Each structure stands twice: as structure tokens, then as C-alpha cells.
Image: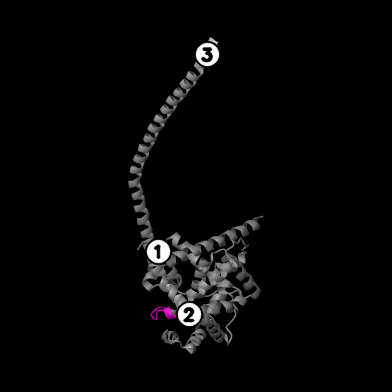
């Protein structure tokens, strides 16, 4: 028999509930095992401390204690039975609510994931369209600025033409 | 035990008189355990009333083949924990002095019966010292030791009260005892140090 097994018998040994054969085995082991001797000392010492702490004169239940318990129960029973249908309903509702919560979670997850997929699919054409648009706008802007510069040249030349004959007339005079 | 089963079955069918009979049968034991745990005489009756009320409302769920006494102990111990938690009268590391006489008294291992000093005032002193030493333990360990050494519950009965295996109960007892022994030895060292000075 191992030391650990024998050490496990010490509580029963202290409470005198070991068989005669086990007691003999343990006592033989105790005679040479310091660890088990120390543990048996701890068991006996603490048992003595506990027994010495025992309070002698405690309050004893009065003759009407059982009746007062019955009265307290009657008072509590009213509220207990008033709330009990609601309590039963709440207890029944818990699994239903749990199933609903799980279903809602799954639904929300699938909705969000499908929404994300759809967004990923539509993002690429949008990008293409925007690139096309920006390039178109760029071309238009280039044409417009070219036109403006052309128009500006025309305006300048017209103004010059209008101004130049007047100057030549002045010189002849 | 069969009387209890009969009473419980009658209670489960709504027999109020049977419940009062059940209370009368166990009230003394419940009062005693509560007193040893909370050590406040004025609180014992209120806690006991809560214990029996709880038992009444839980009786429909009680399995008749289970141990009623173990169940009663479990509910009582839990009710005491609640009370101690509310009062926050938790473990305080005690470094009380331990006289040679008190130490000799605690280390008298010859007798397995409860040690009692013949002098009443000395007995009171020893009890106060023992209480101070015990107050260093957490309530769970203290209640386990009270059930084992004051209520004299066997390992087998403790397994039913705490719904644990015998090896788990022994391990908890081992730790609780060694913790209490360490507090005791610390107090002894302190006293010896004083004597040298």
C-alpha cells in the first residue's frame, strides 16, 4: 500500500471508522512515516480547537417556532402564487427567446455577409464608370479650354483690327 | 429516515401539519448549526425561519430517494454564508497570543471526546482563543470543519452535504486543517518570542 493511499485514510482513522485490518496497516505505516504523523497531529489539533470553540448555551426554538414558520410561509405563498403564472411563463419563454435570438443572429449574419458580397460585386463597375466619366470630363474640359483660348485670340485680333484703322486715319490727318 | 420520507411525501401533497411536524423534528439541529456558524444568538431564529421557508418552497423539487438531512444541512450552511456575506464579517488574520496552558489544552490528544476545562472562566478563555484562531479561516473552510468536528458528520455524510467526492472532501479538510494549524503555530511562535523578551 502506497504512502498516498495510507495518508488518505487518516481522516477515517481519526473518526474511528476504519476496519481493523486497515487500522493495523495504517498504524504500522504511522510508526515510521513522519509526514503522516504530522498530518494526524494536525487533524487532532484542529479537532480540539473546533471542539473548544463550541458554544455551550445556544438559543433553543420556542414552542411556537414551527407555527411562526407556517405563518411566514402563508404570507410568502400569496406573493409566490400571485407571481407563479408569470414565473412559469417566463421560464417557458426563456428557450423560445434563446431560439429566436439565435435565429436573429444567423439572419443578421447572412444579411450582412450577402450585403458585403453585393457591394464588392458592384464596386468594380462603378469604378469603371467613374473612370470613364472622369476621362470624358477631362476631354471636354480640354476642348473647352482650347475653345476659350481660340475665342480669346479671335477677340484680341478683332479688337486690334478695329483699333488699327483709327490710328492710320489719325496719322494721315 | 422512513418517518422523514413519509412526512416529506405528505408535505409534497400540500399537508401543512406534516410540514410543521418536519420543522419540529429538525429545528433544534438547525438552530444549533446556525449558532455555531454565525455565533450571534439574536440572529439564529430569523435565519432558521428563512431556512425552513426555503425548504418548504423547494420541497416539490426534492427527490424522495435523496438524503433529507444532507439537503437540510446544505440549505442551512448556504443561508449562513449569505448572512455572513451580508454582514461582511469575513476572515481576519488573527495573531492572538496563545498561552502555554491553552496550547497544552489544544494539544491534548489522548481523548477523542470534547476537551473541557474544569474551570469555567478558563474554559471561556480557551473558547475565545479557539474562536479567534478559527476566524482566520474563510467561511467555507470554517463551516466544513464545524460540520466535521462539532456536528460530527462523517466523510460519507459530508460528501452528500457538499455534493463532492470523498477525495475532494478530504482534500478540502486537509487544506483547512493545515491552514488552521499554521495560524495556531504562528500564535505560538509569537507567544514564545514574547516570553524570551
Mark 3 or mark 1, which is nearer the start of the sequence? 1
Tell me where residue A14 appears, x and y as whole percent: 46, 70
Q: Which residues are magenta?
A: B57-66
Pick the residue in front: A36 or B66. B66
Check residue A101 in the rendering and tell me which mark sits there, or answer none. 1
Circle 1 packing at 10 Å, graded few (<14), some (14-19), many (20+), is: few
Q: How many marks?
A: 3
User: Does any portion of residue B165 appear in the rendered image?
Assistant: no
Tell me where residue B60 appears, x and y as whole percent: 43, 81
Do labels 1 and 3 touch, CB within 8 Å?
Answer: no
Work out whether B31 lies above or below B171: below
Q: What residue would you read off at disc 3?
A: A169
Toward the top, the furthest residue is A172
Tell me where residue B170 appears, x and y as whole percent: 44, 66
Q: What residue would you read off at disc 2?
A: B57
Pick the residue in front: B99 or B1. B1
Q: Which residue is located at x 49 percent, y 69 percent?
A: B144
Q: Chain of mark 1?
A: A
The C terminus of chain A: image quadrant: top right
Distance from Cα at disc 2 to Cα at disc 1: 32 Å
Secondary structure category for the residue under label 3 = helix
Q: Which residue is located at x 52 percent, y 13 percent?
A: A169
Circle 2 packing at 10 Å, graded few (<14), some (14-19), many (20+), is: some
- Is residue B64 in the magenta section? yes
Amino acid at each position: 500500500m502506497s504512502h498516498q493511499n495510507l495518508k488518505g485514510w487518516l481522516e477515517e482513522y481519526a473518526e474511528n471508522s476504519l476496519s481493523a485490518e486497515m487500522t493495523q496497516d495504517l498504524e504500522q505505516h504511522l510508526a515510521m512515516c513522519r509526514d503522516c504523523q504530522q498530518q494526524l497531529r494536525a487533524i487532532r489539533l484542529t479537532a480540539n480547537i473546533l471542539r473548544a470553540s463550541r458554544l455551550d448555551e445556544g438559543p433553543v426554538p420556542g414552542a411556537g417556532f414551527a407555527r411562526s414558520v407556517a405563518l411566514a410561509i402563508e404570507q410568502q405563498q400569496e406573493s409566490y402564487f400571485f407571481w407563479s403564472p408569470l414565473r412559469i411563463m417566463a421560464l417557458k419563454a426563456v428557450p423560445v427567446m434563446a431560439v429566436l435570438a439565435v435565429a436573429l443572429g444567423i439572419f443578421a449574419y447572412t444579411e450582412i455577409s450577402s450585403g458585403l458580397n453585393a457591394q464588392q460585386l458592384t464596386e468594380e463597375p462603378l469604378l469603371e464608370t467613374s473612370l470613364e466619366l472622369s476621362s470624358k470630363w477631362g476631354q471636354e474640359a480640354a476642348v473647352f479650354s482650347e475653345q476659350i483660348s481660340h475665342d480669346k485670340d479671335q477677340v484680341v485680333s478683332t479688337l486690334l483690327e478695329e483699333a488699327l484703322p483709327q490710328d492710320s486715319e489719325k496719322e494721315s490727318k | 429516515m422512513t418517518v422523514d420520507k413519509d412526512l416529506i411525501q405528505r408535505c409534497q401533497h400540500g399537508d401543512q401539519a406534516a410540514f410543521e411536524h418536519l420543522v419540529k423534528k429538525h429545528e433544534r439541529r438547525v438552530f444549533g448549526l446556525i449558532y455555531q456558524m454565525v455565533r450571534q444568538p439574536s440572529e439564529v431564529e430569523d435565519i432558521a425561519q428563512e431556512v425552513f421557508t426555503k425548504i418548504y418552497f423547494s420541497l416539490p423539487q426534492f427527490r424522495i430517494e435523496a438524503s433529507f438531512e444532507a439537503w437540510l444541512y446544505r440549505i442551512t450552511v448556504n443561508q449562513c454564508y449569505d448572512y455572513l456575506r451580508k454582514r461582511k464579517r469575513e476572515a481576519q488574520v488573527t495573531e492572538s497570543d496563545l498561552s502555554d496552558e491553552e496550547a497544552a489544552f489544544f494539544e491534548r490528544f489522548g481523548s477523542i471526546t470534547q476537551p473541557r476545562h474544569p474551570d469555567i472562566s478558563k474554559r471561556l478563555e480557551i473558547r475565545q482563543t479557539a474562536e479567534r484562531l478559527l476566524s482566520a479561516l474563510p467561511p467555507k473552510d470554517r463551516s466544513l470543519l464545524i460540520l466535521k468536528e462539532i456536528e460530527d458528520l462523517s466523510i460519507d455524510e459530508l460528501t452528500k452535504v457538499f455534493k463532492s467526492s470523498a477525495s475532494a472532501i478530504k482534500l478540502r479538510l486537509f487544506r483547512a486543517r493545515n491552514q488552521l494549524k499554521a495560524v495556531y503555530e504562528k500564535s505560538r511562535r509569537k507567544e514564545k518570542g514574547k516570553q524570551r523578551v
